[in-house]
Image (spheres, helix red, strand yellow):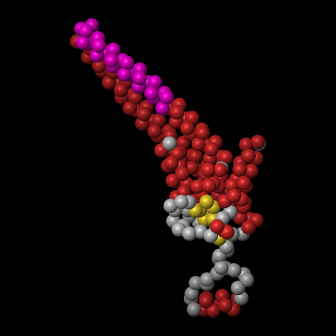
Amino acid sequence: MKHLSLVINVILGVAVAVLFVLHFTDPGIPEEIRAEYEERGEFFPASLDIVYVNFDTLLENYDMFFDLQREFLEKQQKLEGDLSTRSRRYERQVADFQDRVQKGLMTRSQAQQRELELMQVQQELMQMSEQFSIELREEEQVMNRQLQHSIYEFLEEFNRMHNYQYVLSHSFGGPLLYVDKNLDVTREVIEGLNRRYGESRRR
């Protein structure tokens, strides 16, 4: 499960950033007031339309995340199973070799040759373990990008209807220490994401 925790950490790190900045000024503010700020060279304090998504809740309820998580675990279990099978076979070979040497059933040259063969098998197992780790890391990276792309793409559509200036990510222990629950659009986003994902699977 440590691989899956990395997925969540990576996504949270990216999603904490501001996703969309669509307007920097409020057209409802009189132009004269805005001009006064500009003349003084000061930043115009425009009102901001901000909402947030609880990212922990989103991941707990996003169907795409569960599907990717299941695929990742299946691949992880398969690779670990292959490595475990080969490792047990190697251990039996080593035990058999040691038993034959102790019983004097091999000549010295045969023992040396067999020892070299077993060392080669051990090296191959180490290389396989390293390769499996690389494959799983790549799977995580692809999973991260798929989730990020899916969420960002949906939020672009979502924001066309609402025109928010900022859509923030909130999670327990994250950088946002306080959020007004009236600004929470998590449920709406989850419903939209799952509806969009369901439609894509039926194509």
Q: Could you say where residue 2 lies in the image, as x and y percent from the top left?
A: 48, 44
In the image, is residue 110 above or below residue 122?
above
The range drawn in magenta is 80-105
In the image, is residue 164 above or below residue 141?
below
Q: Quadrant of the C terminus?
A: top right
Quarter location, residue 170: bottom right
Question: Image point 41% across, 23% down: which residue?
Answer: 88
- Residue 190 visible to an observer of this rendering: yes
The secondary structure that dominates the magenta segment is helix
Determine if the magenta segment contains residue 152.
no
In the image, is residue 96 above or below residue 14?
above
Q: Could you say where residue 52 lies in the image, as x and y percent from the top left?
A: 63, 65
Residue farthest along the top direction in this orientation: 105
Question: Image point 50% across, 39% down: which residue?
Answer: 135
Is 127 placed left or right of 105 in the picture? Answer: right
Question: Image point 41% across, 20% down: which residue?
Answer: 89
Quarter location, residue 105: top left
Please name whichever residue, 170 or 112, is drawn nearer the observer in this view of the structure: 170
Is 11 placed left or right of 63 in the picture? Answer: left
Question: Image point 65% across, 71% down: which residue?
Answer: 50
- Residue 51 visible to an observer of this rendering: no
Please name whichever residue, 12 or 42, is drawn nearer the observer in this view of the structure: 12
Number of numbered tags placed on the structure image: 0
In the image, is residue 23 above or below residue 140?
below
Please name whichever residue, 120 or 91, is drawn nearer the observer in this view of the structure: 91
Q: Could you say where residue 78 lies in the image, as x and y percent from the top left?
A: 53, 31
